[in-house]
Amino acid sequence: MGASLSFLQSKLRGRRRKVYEGDRLEELRQAGTVAQLWERLYPREPTGTRLGLQRRLRQDCIQELASVWRYVPPDFELLYGALLRRFQVDNAIVLLRLVTRGEEEPEPERYLPELPAPLALPTERLLTSGNVEEFIEGLPSDLAQSAARALPLHDAHESGAFIEMALERAWWDAVCAALRGVHRHREQCAAPLRVELRGARLTAVLRAARHYELGWDELRTVLPRWSGEHEPPAGGRQGMASLREVFEDPSPAKVVECCAGMKPEDTEDLANLEQWLWEQAVRRADRIYYSMAEGPSILVCYFYVRRNELKGLTRLVEELHYAEQP
């Protein structure tokens, strides 16, 4: 139904105080077990498993961000809806892994949060797909079209990684298309998204270079692309020419050319590198969040705030779980 931006800004700034980040997140680390963390976060509910807690955290994040959707002004609703499709793509990737793993009785309720009706996937149909081609046919049209183009890579390398990349690319395409329709404060809205995309492209290139035998022209068909304004110049840091150089030479020395401020020894572990790159996007979102007195960019930044909270809580669950193992 839409609401004034001043109303939304006031609402979201008030909610920020309840986010588990910084000292509030550190306080949760005092929980010694996953069960104790359950009790701290949901004291009126019975405790459950690690996967159950992670699913619940994801569900809460989706519900929180979706609760804002109906208040978003009409000229920004398309972009906000495109951002929320992040969770649709995440669910599609989990379902793809369950299908390709070939489990006899996959239990999606252990992994998948429910999505708002506009974002819901035909979970049962996807889970009962006889093959990857049938799975793709059950996806929303834009995801299906992008995933279908990755089938030759999937077949050649017998890996679902390329279809996952194609799904990610479809999300970025939708976000960029929606961003072009934003006429107020577009650059502030685009800034954290652009930083995240640069990091996503770099890690995708490194993962492909280190684990698969394929050519650059094959890889770029599934690489996420920035089709908005201010794409890095072809030869600039994290432009396509630079990414191709990293693909051809994925050494730490070459990677740090795209990651100013990172040490070469810190680029060898892709998980750590991915987290470092993600934090750059969160920092950009935070700077905009606190510097802008008005404008729609607070919605984009709040999207990052909540996703970052989810990542931090999910990591904490993992840490506690593995600390309990003998």
Image: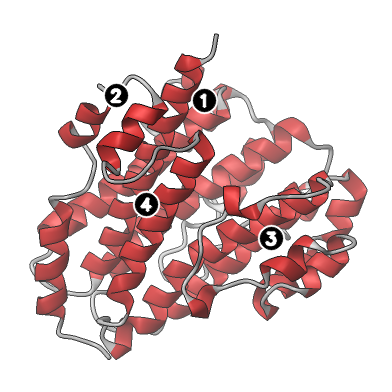
Residue type pointed to by label 2:
Ala
Residue 54 placement (x, y as % from top left): 46, 43
Q: Which of marks 3 and 2 is nearer the N terminus?
A: 2
Question: In this figure, which residue is indicated by the disc labeled 1?
Answer: 267
The answer to whether the residues at label 4 and label 3 have Cβ atoms under 8 Å apart is no
Q: Residue at x 66, y 77 (%)?
A: 140
Give SS at disc 3: helix
Give the foreground label among 2 and 4. Answer: 2
Residue type pointed to by label 3:
Ala
Label 4 Cα neighbours within 10 Å, binned few <14 / some 14-19 / many ≥20 = some
Question: In this figure, which residue is indicated by the disc labeled 4?
Answer: 307
Q: Is residue 15 left or right of residue 199?
A: left
Give SS at disc 2: loop
Residue 186 placement (x, y as % from top left): 30, 74
Structure colour scheme: secondary structure
Q: Which residue is drawn at 35% across and 83% down?
A: 77
Disc ID at residue 31: 2
Label 1 Cα neighbours within 10 Å, binned few <14 / some 14-19 / many ≥20 = many
Residue 182 visible? The answer is: no
Residue type pointed to by label 4:
Arg
Q: In which quarter of the image is the C terminus?
A: top right
Give SS at disc 1: helix
Q: Earlier in the sequence, mark 2 or mark 1?
A: 2
Q: Distance between the residues labelled 2 and 1?
A: 31 Å
Give the foreground label among 2 and 1. Answer: 2
Q: Which of marks 4 and 1 is nearer the N terminus?
A: 1
Question: In this figure, which residue is indicated by the disc labeled 3?
Answer: 166
Q: How far apart are marks 3 and 1 (CA)?
A: 24 Å
Give the foreground label among 4 and 3. Answer: 4
The answer to whether the residues at label 3 and label 1 have Cβ atoms under 8 Å apart is no
